[in-house]
Every structure is written in C-alpha cells, then in structure tokens.
Image (spheres, coloured by chain):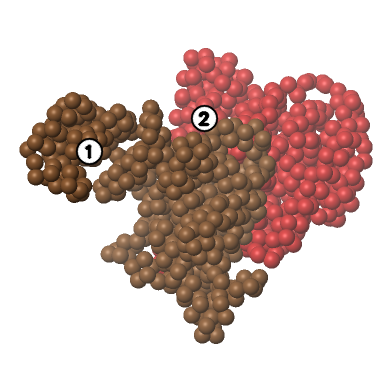
Amino acid sequence: MDLHTLTMAQAQDLLSRGEICSVELTQALLDRIDLYDDRIGAFITVDKSCALAQAKAADERIAKGDNAPFTGIPIALKDLLCTKGIKTTCGSKILGDFVPQYDATVVAKLKKDNAVVLGKTNLDEFGMGSSTENSAFKITRNPWSEDHVPGGSSGGSAAAVAAQFCCGALGTDTGGSIRQPASHCGVVGLKPTYGRVSRFGLVSYASSLDQIGPITRDVRDAAMMMNLICSHDPKDSTSAGVQVPDFTKALKENQSLEGMKAGIPREYLEVEGIDPGVRSIFEQARKVLENLGVEIVEISLPHTQYAVAAYYILAPCEASSNLARFDGVRYGARDSDSQDLLEMYKKTRSQGFGPEVQRRIIIGTYALSAGYYDAYYGRASQVRTLITKDFSKAFDQCDFILSPVAPTPAFKIGENTKDPLTMYLSDIFTLSANMAGIPGLCVPAGFSPKGLPVGIQMMAKRFDEMSLLRAGFGFERALDLKTSFPVL
Amino acid sequence: MELEPVIGLEVHAQLKTKTKIFCNCSTQFGRSPNENTCPVCTGMPGVLPVLNFQAVTFAIKAALATGCKIARESRFDRKNYFYPDLPKGYQISQYAAPIAEHGHLDIETQKNGAKTIGITRIHMEEDAGKLIHDPVRARSMVDLNRTGVPLIEIVSEPDIRTAEEAGAYLRKLHTLLKYIDVCDGNMEEGSFRCDANISLRPRGQEKFGTRTELKNLNSFKNVEKAIRYEIDRQAYVLEEGKSIIQETRLWDPNKNKTASMRGKEDAHDYRYFPDPDLPPLIVDETWIQSVAKLMPELPDQKMVRFIEQFQLSVYDATVLTSNLDLADYFEETIKGLSDIKQAANWTMTTLLGMLNAKGLNITQSPVTATAFSTLLKLIEKKAINAKTAKNVFEQMVSSCKTPETIVKENGLEQVSDHSQLEELVDKIILENPDEAAAYRGGKTKLFSFFMGQVMKNTRGKADPKIVTPLIKSKL
C-alpha cells in the first residue's frame, strides 16, 4: 500500500482498525519529504524525531482504544502558527530562530487528539503575498509544474498536500491565502467564517481578516478538519460563540443538490484578464452543478470594483500595527551594532523584513497617519461595509456564490515579482470573502491546457460552511477528476 | 493686562484588579522584574488580548461616582508608537469612543469657594512597562510587570483656574476613587498619576492661549507647586512679549522648576485605529444597575448625612468623611454614645493628633474604634473625667489595654460619691481657715484653690460637677 496516498479519512479508518500504525505512516511521509522536498520546498522545518515520537504516542493511544479522530494522522502546519518548542519563522528573517513558548489553539487541539505534526510549511513572509515567493527562506515550487508557483501565501501547505507529503495541512487566509494556493495546487481549501476558528497563536497579519482553515486532498477531509478546529476560544475575543455542527453530516454519497441555488456575480465575469482556460473550467463547473440540480441565478455584487483597493488599505493598516512588535527588543533578530535605540529599531526592521512586508508596513503607516485616516482607513472601512451588505443581499437570492478562485492558473516563478499591483489584482475573487467575514471553499475543477490545476470557489453566508461542504462534496464526486495528484 | 490661568488635569488611576486588563497576570506591585508577565503582556507573536471585565466594572463605578454618562457601546483603539516599554508597539486605549463622558466633580477652595469642575471623559487603557537604566554598564533593562495593568484616565474640562483648585480637584478625586474602592491611590507606587495642561489668556478673552503639558507630578504638593511655577513662567514669557511654545514639560521636584521635555515638532502621530482584536465593549443597563447597587455612599452624600443625622458642623463632617476608613471608624465609635459632638472632637483632636504625630493612618491606629468608643462611654457615664480620659487614652496607645483595665489598674474611677466628697470639702475648709475667710470676704477667685485641693486629694478623680456646688454652698 502506498501510505502517502491516503486521505485523512482513509488513514483514520486504517489506523483505528489497526491495519496500519501511525509510526509507519509518519515514516512513509517523512521518507517522501526526504526524497522530494529538496525540489518542491514545501517545508521550512521538518522535525522528524518529534513527529515520530508523536506517532509512537498515538499508536499507544490507539492500542488502548481511546483514539480521537486525529490520533496518529500526520499534518503539516503553515509556519505562521505557533508551535511550542518548534521554530515558528513566519517566513521572515526577523523570526528566523524564534521558538514559541506556547501552542496556537488549533495546534493544541491537534495535540490533544494526538495528531502528528510533521513540520512547518513555507509561506509568503507573514502571509503577505500570493505566490510564496516572498518567503525569506526558500521558493516553493508547484508540484504539478516545478517552474510554476504554488500560489500563496499558504503555498507550502498547498504544495505539501498536493505532493502527498502529509495527509492534510492547515493554512491561513487573509485575502485568499488558503483558497488561491489550493486552486493552483489542485487541492481543497476552506476559509471558514471569521470567528469560527480561534486565531490565538496565529501570528497576526490583518486581525480582522485572518482566519485559519484546512487544506486537504478532498472535501471530506476538509469537513473532518473543520470538526477539529472550530470552536469558541476564550483566548480569542473575536472567536464566535456559535454552535459548531458536525460538518461531516454535510457529506452524503450520491446526494442530489436539488433545491440549492448558486449565484454567479455578474461583476466577477466582467473582471479583466480572466484566463480563457479558467473561464472554460468555470463554465464546465457550472454545468456539473446544474446537472446535480443546482439552480444557477445571476446576482450582483456592485461594489466589487472597490474591493481590491479597500483591502489593500485595510490589511496594510492592521499589518503596520501588528508587525510593530517585531522591534528587536524582546525576541527575534536584533541589529547588534546600533549605537542608539532609534538606529536599532531602523536597522533591525530594515534588515529583518523583506520588501513586500516593508511595502505594506509603509502603506499602512501612511494610511493611518493624521490627516489621511479618514480618506484611507475611514473610506476603506465604509467600502467594507458596503461589500458586506452586497453579500447579505446576494444571499437572499442564493445558497452559495460560485466564482473562479483566481483569474489565472499558477504563474511562472518570477513572472509577477516585479509588479506588485498585478499580484494584488489577482486576489479579486477571494478577498471579498475576508472583507465580509464569510466562508469560502475552493474545490479542484479541472486543468488548464498547460496541465495546471484550476479550482472553483463557493462562498456562503456567515457560519454556513455546511452548504459549502455539501455542494463541494457533490461537485467533487460528480466531477471525479481522475488525475488528482501530480507525479513527482 | 491681567492674565487668567486655564488648567485641565489628566489623571491616570490604576484599577485595583487582581489581574491585568488583557491577560491573567498578577498586578501585584514590587515583584522581581518580569515576574508578572506572560506571552500576552510581553507581546509575543500570535497572542490576543481578552478584556478583564472586573476592570470594566471598576470603570463603570468611577463613571457613576463622577456623574458621567456611560456609553452603551465603547471601543478599544490602538495607540501606535515605538518604545521598549511598550511590547506590542501599540498601547490599547480608548480614543474615539470612551466608556464614559460628561461628568463633574464639586470642589471647594478657601479663596474661590464651591465650584463644579467638568469631567470630559473617562477611558480605559493598559499601562506600559518600565525601563531601568544601568549607568555603570550603559545599558537599559526592561521590566514588563506593569505592562497591561488596567488604568482609567480621567480628563477634566479646562475649568480649573488656580493651583489651589487643581489641588482640591485632585484630592477630591483621590478620595472618591478610594471611597468606591477602585484605586488604592498610592502615589509613590504610581497608582494615581497626574498630568496638567496649562495656558494663560487675558481675563475676559474666550480663546485659550497656547498650552504646555506638565508631567511627573507625583504628589499633591508637587502638582500645586508645579502649576504655580508654570503659571509664573508663562506669565513672565508673555509679559516679555514672547510666545509660549506648545510642549511637554517635566517638573523637577529638586530644582522646583519645569523644563522642556519634548516640543510639538517631536509630537507623535499615534495613528489611532480600532483594535481589530477586541469587539466593541457593550455595557447594558443591567450591568450598570448591578454596579450601581454596589456603590457605597459617596463622600458628599456621607458628609450631608453626618450633618443631618449627627448634627455635626460642616467642618467636622468634612474632616470626618475625608476618607472612608476614618468615616467608618467614627461611625463605629459613636455606636451607643449620646454625645456625638464630644466624640467628634475627641476623634479629630485627640485621635487624629496622635495618628499624625506617629505618622499612621486610621487603619493602623493602635486604638480600635471599639476601645475608643468604650473610653468615650466612660466619660459619658462620668466614670472618669475628661482629664483622666486623656491620660487613659495615652496609656491605651502605648499599652493596647482596654480603657476599663487601665482605669481599674490605676484606680482612676471618678469620685462621684456625694457624701465622700462633702466630707472631703469640709475637711479642706477646716484645714484652710484663712483662705475660707478670704473667700467669704469676697475673694471668690480662691474658688479654684479649693477645687485644686479637692483634686489633689482625689488625684484628679473628683467629679467637678459635684464638687463645684459643694464648695460654693459650704463657703
């Protein structure tokens, strides 16, 4: 049996029945990482001995028969999630040697179940980017085509899942950072409703937009992982005190989607620069859903054209403040030659942060300055409210919104690095979900003519991940993509 | 041209919560550096603030005590600036939407009498840490124990006109916050800190002059001294025909002057914006009502009650309600007493005199309210006279014995037995025939001679109210 091909659900089944043990599964994945990750570059840190120790503990727990759903299942974590005792770099030189004293709430939940943490995956520095090229440490390559980016910022997690280095992974999504790399790597990615998952221990990029979510091989695994990570957390004041359903209940084999309505925003199809391959895959997806009984309605999200501009004000504003703590005083890198405090701050931060992070800190600092606040932060917040209202109106007409994830398939490494604006514009379909706090799911939908995976996105109203998982699962089963994983 | 000072005060009061405002660390003062810290208050990556609702309850109390309007929805903002004592690179404060606004405090000064000072706002915020500079190794060290300790900032309207009024306002506010038990008021430990904004304008002009902000005013005396100095300094500058620079000035208590700390050109742009990690703070009517129920009687209310209930003078009532512990002591003392005025006098002169001399506050008094009350009861029952009582009081202070014990051990009971005293008076008149004759001849001043003899014979224990008519009738 090729252990690395197992989904989380399959691994769970085999582990609980004693047909495989976690140590052999973990070892198989570690071997595969050893073999291929020099090429792919999905991981920043792999802690083999720790992973194997966790696997051993999991096997002992399974032997006693008190296994939890994730006991023994090897997972990869985006390196923006704090892991006690394991280096957490955020893809930044400024935290190159930083080892947290505590676990993020989601990590603590994984550990409580005795899941196995294989390692920490690469990302755009502090989550700022759409290609994982903004990592201070390495380039991550798209497992489907190694001269292409995996997307970002959770590019390492998406690549690790696509390359079958792990059963599943956690990513974070501030403007599309789970969904876009999932689309580019041909895997499933779900950004939950804002407040569904505790952000405690997620190193903040833009606090009002950040959300942790699963990146998995299929929709069932995403639902499984949602069951684990969603809950109210007293350590996160923005986490919601809402009931968490059993998300796997959304998954029913051969279920008809009769009665569901999918809205297609007319403004999204008018976006310039949508790749013809993406367009045709989107059309196919629409037909697949229609065949499943989904009624397609045209909807309008009239403020779409302002979303990118507003997002690239709000996110940098929050970032400029969130990243102020990286000052060299208490932890992380510090310039040691400085003669005074101001020089130490300047040198530490200029040397510690990469260009994209510095660009966003400068934009945010400027936009929050006295005299500019109303024109920038104030206006952008108003746009955010309007976008949120657009979505609430839209959800009066449909159960979920169907859209592309990104205007193009994965682009070539280096192709867009000179032009941050084009890179920002490619977030057009995903960042509105963050602005409105609604959940968004990316499901693989086909391949571009060049053989690069392309996903579709479904968005639902707040706390209605069930509709997304239901429609996503139905779509995934109906589409039945045969070549769902790349050959390395 | 006569110049009129315009003064506004900003008071930072530390709330008496056991734990910090956004994490569970202790707020205890005097721990070793960085002992009271955790990932949240040291600003580690990925941590999030969780509001301490006890701090909110205390802020509501302060708002109710100052007649502020409490916002149903307030908000926390980030005040962004870099400094090593500020781990996150921003202070969480309330800027655009504070928890309470539009209150007032009534003060009284000798010169200007009663006056109401407006309170602009009360907002909640976290304290910063502390830098310790090591001059030997030319290093600075950071202590984050104080980081995240909850504060309220109480901002007054620019209604204050003199240093004396500023002092009265601060003392009143200090008393009030201690009364409602939200702040320990310890100025040395920094639990109650004050900044003053001062400007001058020609009397009659409405527009404010350019102001300076005074910092480091760590005692009531310093506040008054610094404000007086700054008023004189500004007046001098203006009379020279120069203009005031808007700046922050530091009070130097050793040199007794203020000096420029930073000018307007160095003024920070704090880039305030709503903290996305904290949802709006909702304070509903139920919460306010539940806090209102916990409110103790406020100093002004207590003073009025003391006047009405105990027929005390305004002065006595003011002194006795000037702090809650003293007021409680007094009320405990007068239980079962009938002469309240006498108790008030004893409390204010004898008891407070002794405490002042010893540098103690009322809670540290060696004489408990119960013992003090017993002493006063002995006077009321005429078991001892006032003079003896002073003596007993002194022994109570030094020995901690009960007044009854002291009286018994020393045989100090007042002699009130009529026949015993009559016998004594007869004997003294017989023994002093010359003085008796002189008295009878009109030298009534000799009355005190006979009284003195009686007291001498009874070692001061004779009841003068009985002795006086006896002497007079016998002579």
- The image's mark for residue B302 is none
Q: Are marks 2 and 1 on the same chain?
A: no
The residue shown at (53%, 80%) is: B238
Disc 2 on helix, strand or loop? helix
Amino acid, disc 1: Lys
Q: Colour of chain A?
A: red
Residue B40 located left or right of residue B348: right
**Where in the figure is residue A91, as x and y percent of width and height?**
56, 51
Of B27 and B416, which appears nearest the observer?
A: B416
- Looking at the rendering, in which quadrant would you find the N terminus of chain B? bottom right
Residue at the outermost left position? B431
Q: Disc 2 designates what residue?
A: A111
Does residue A408 appear anywhere in the picture?
A: no
Give the crowd class for mark 2: few <14, some 14-19, many >=20 residues within 10 Å.
Answer: some
Q: Colour of chain B?
A: brown
The residue shown at (58%, 15%) is: A17
Q: Disc 1 designates what residue?
A: B472
Disc 1 on helix, strand or loop? helix
Amino acid, disc 2: Lys
